[in-house]
Image (spheres, rainbow, N blue to C red):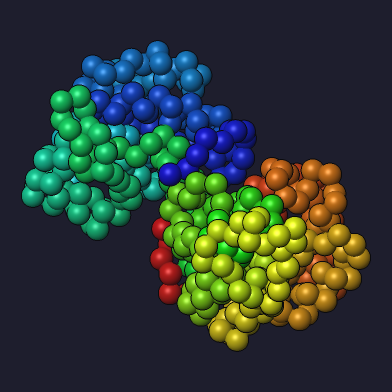
Amino acid sequence: MAGPRALSLRPPWEGRKVVLGVTGGIAAYKAVQVARDLTRLGALVDVVLTRSAEEFVRPLSFEGVTGRSVLTSLWSAEGSARHLTLAGEADLVLVAPATADFLARASQGRGDDLLTTLLLATRAPVLLAPAMNDRMWSHPQTVRNAHHCREVLGYRLVGPRDGPLAAGEGAGPGRMLEPDELVEWSGRLLGAVSPWSSIQVLVTAGPTREPLDAVRYVGNRSSGRMGFAVAREAWLRGSEVTLVTGPSALPDPVGVTVRRVETAREMRDAVMEVAPRANLSVFAAAVADFRPQDPSREKQKRKDTGSEWAIRLVENPDVAGESRSVRPPGSVAVGFALETGELISRAREKLEAKGFDLIVANDAGEEGAGFDVTTNRVTLLDREGGAEALPLMGKEEVARVILDRVESHLPSTSNGDDS
């Protein structure tokens, strides 16, 4: 699940038109937050409430967070042709919650209210967030309806997940995804483009921890933010993304396959397994160059070590370097170089030695860049000798620029899917 984040205008939501359909389930209250967050990201959100949805939420709540009128009836003067206008202008139709009754009507191609009629008229991507009692979700007819919506009509269904249901209903599979997850999924359907939607991406992130004893380790201050931002951005563009990360407090990015590891050797093993399938590999992890040769299985006490504790360090595997032998021909590799001096020359040496196509260089002493901050100031170096110095910006924006620069090097087709 994605964690809370500061929302501001940004692609792929900015300037896009989203129709948010809300049906009559208890989870309808969450749709107000979805509408608010989409609007804050820059989307123009038109809300369509079914008659039963109005029993749970009122139009005024949505009008207050979107600044736009809410549509409720197919038969109003505004709604009589409005469904055609909305259907033609929409970049995405999101229905949250999608009740069992709605799934049944949608799968049958019914057009008995404004929302189902709009679905028949639109050619925009459709994202459904089912929510209902677990017994209703497991009913054979609901299973068939969901399958038909997904496999025949081409709608994207996300969820439901296991969790607490309405009061008195206990817990089980039927809970609607949280608003922040639905916003991320909406971004993926809005942002999926070729060639990103046909490739697989590997990203490494975070620090590694090399044990000294049962409780202590050798590590660094990497938070993983930069690698997580790259993984999220690639996923929003439509790629299938695997994130191999060392210890990080960041939540797993929505939709991304996350493999959490501790040591450099564990990261190497995970990377060597994933890299042969990756069209793009981004090595953003801060991997420890050395590890203690003989870590203790027990906690070392001061009375046992005395006033000094001598530790012999041995070299760790070069994760990015070793992956060079298994990266598929034609794939693209991006590295990171965090230095404390001679930034450009050292970064270029690393680019050549590890077979990168692009390297992202930044100075560890730069204020507002590097570890423990949400911003970064980097220089992008390529194999042709180019150097592009970027201003200080948020790491999510840096991730967008990096992938923009990589895009021209990507293969146009692959064996991945487009969603």
Q: Quadrant of residue 172?
A: top left
**Total number of numbered discs in the rendering:** 0
Choose top left, top right, bottom left or bottom right for residue 81.
top left
Viewer can see residue 117: no
Q: Which quadrant of the view contains residue 327? A: bottom right
Residue at screen point 40% across, 16% down: 61
Residues 392 and 85: in front is 392
User: In this rendering, would 140 be left or right of 172?
Assistant: left
Image location of residue 178, percent across then percent down: 38, 36
Q: Is residue 39 above or below residue 383?
A: above
Viewer-closest of 25 and 411: 25
In-front residue for pair 223/7: 223
Residue at the (64%, 50%) spot, across then down: 223
Name of the residue lying farthest toward the right:
342
Position of 4 with respect to 125 (left or right) is: right
Work out whether residue 264 can be spotted.
yes
Percent across and percent down for residue 283 are 64, 67
Quadrant housing the C terminus? bottom left
Query: In the figure, 375 relative to 56: above or below?
Result: below
